[in-house]
């Protein structure tokens, strides 16, 4: 009691993390709609049809993370939910977003697929913020669970979410699904 992970706990200076890889589900849906079969597409379609939520990770983040939610509406949309609930801003770095090998191969051929990766949902990976003093504990959790946990940005003062390139220049980003 009193330790629940909510969207509303992010604090300026927190690092933004994601579990696993992002965008597989959105790319899998695109591949399913195109009905093109190849091993990369088959992997992505499986990720779309059979997501694997990280329940054990969520439990281990209690007392470690300040804010947390799953990536269901799209990475940028869900990050904006955390920021709105926490009254903070965020800077996410596109080049740090972890991609599976099949997703990276597709993006290398078609850079426009970044919109699906940053705006597509249904990955059910965890998006969470962690204060710097808990990063070593987080690394131990990643090792214990054999699950990649990747820092993709930081929580900032102010409002709004920015997606930045490797030179820290703002990029346009698809925002994802809006319920209302």
Image (cartoon, grey):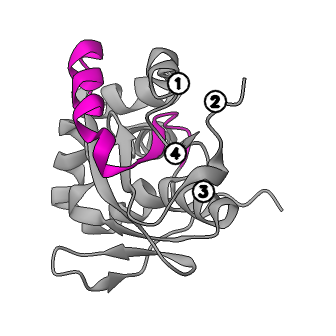
Residue 111 is drawn in which quadrant?
A: bottom left
Q: Nearer the viewer, mark 1 or mark 2?
A: 2
Name the residue furthest bottom: 169
Estimate the x, y position of residue 21 in percent, counting from the top left: 32, 38
- SS for tag 3? helix
Which of disc 3 and disc 2 is earlier in sequence?
2
Estimate the x, y position of residue 53 in percent, counting from the top left: 51, 22
Query: Residue beneath label 3, please?
Result: 82
Q: Is residue 80 above or below residue 20?
A: below
Q: Distance from label 1 to label 2 (Cα)?
A: 32 Å
Q: Is residue 49 magenta?
A: no
Q: Which quarter shows the C terminus?
A: bottom right
How many residues crowd around disc 2 within 10 Å: few (fewer than 14), some, or many (20 or more)? few
Residue lying at 44% horizontally and 37% vertically, measured from the top left? 35
How many residues crowd around disc 4 within 10 Å: few (fewer than 14), some, or many (20 or more)? many
Q: Nearer the viewer, mark 1 or mark 4?
A: 4
Query: Residue beneath label 4, please?
Result: 66
Query: Residue beneath label 1, please?
Result: 49
Query: Residue beneath label 2, please?
Result: 3
2 and 4 marks in contact (CB < 8 Å): no
Q: Distance from label 1 to label 4 (Cα)?
A: 30 Å
Q: Is residue 126 magenta?
A: yes
């Amino acid at each position: 009691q009193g330790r629940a992970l909510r969207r509303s706990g992010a604090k300026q200076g927190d690092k933004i993390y994601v579990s696993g890889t992002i965008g597989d589900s959105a790319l899998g849906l695109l591949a399913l709609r195109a009905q093109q079969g190849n091993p990369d597409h088959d992997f992505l379609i499986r990720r779309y049809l059979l997501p694997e939520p990280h329940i054990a990770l969520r439990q281990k983040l209690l007392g470690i993370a300040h804010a947390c939610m799953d990536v269901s509406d799209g990475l940028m949309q869900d990050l904006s939910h955390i920021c709105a609930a926490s009254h903070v801003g965020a800077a996410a770095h596109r080049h740090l977003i972890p991609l599976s090998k099949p997703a990276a191969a597709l993006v290398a051929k078609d850079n426009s697929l970044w919109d699906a990766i940053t705006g597509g949902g249904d990955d059910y990976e965890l998006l969470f913020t962690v204060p710097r003093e808990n990063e070593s504990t987080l690394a131990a959790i990643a090792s214990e669970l054999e699950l990649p946990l990747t820092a993709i940005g930081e929580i900032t003062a102010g409002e709004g979410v920015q997606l930045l390139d490797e030179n820290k220049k703002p990029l346009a980003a698809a925002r994802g699904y809006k319920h209302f």
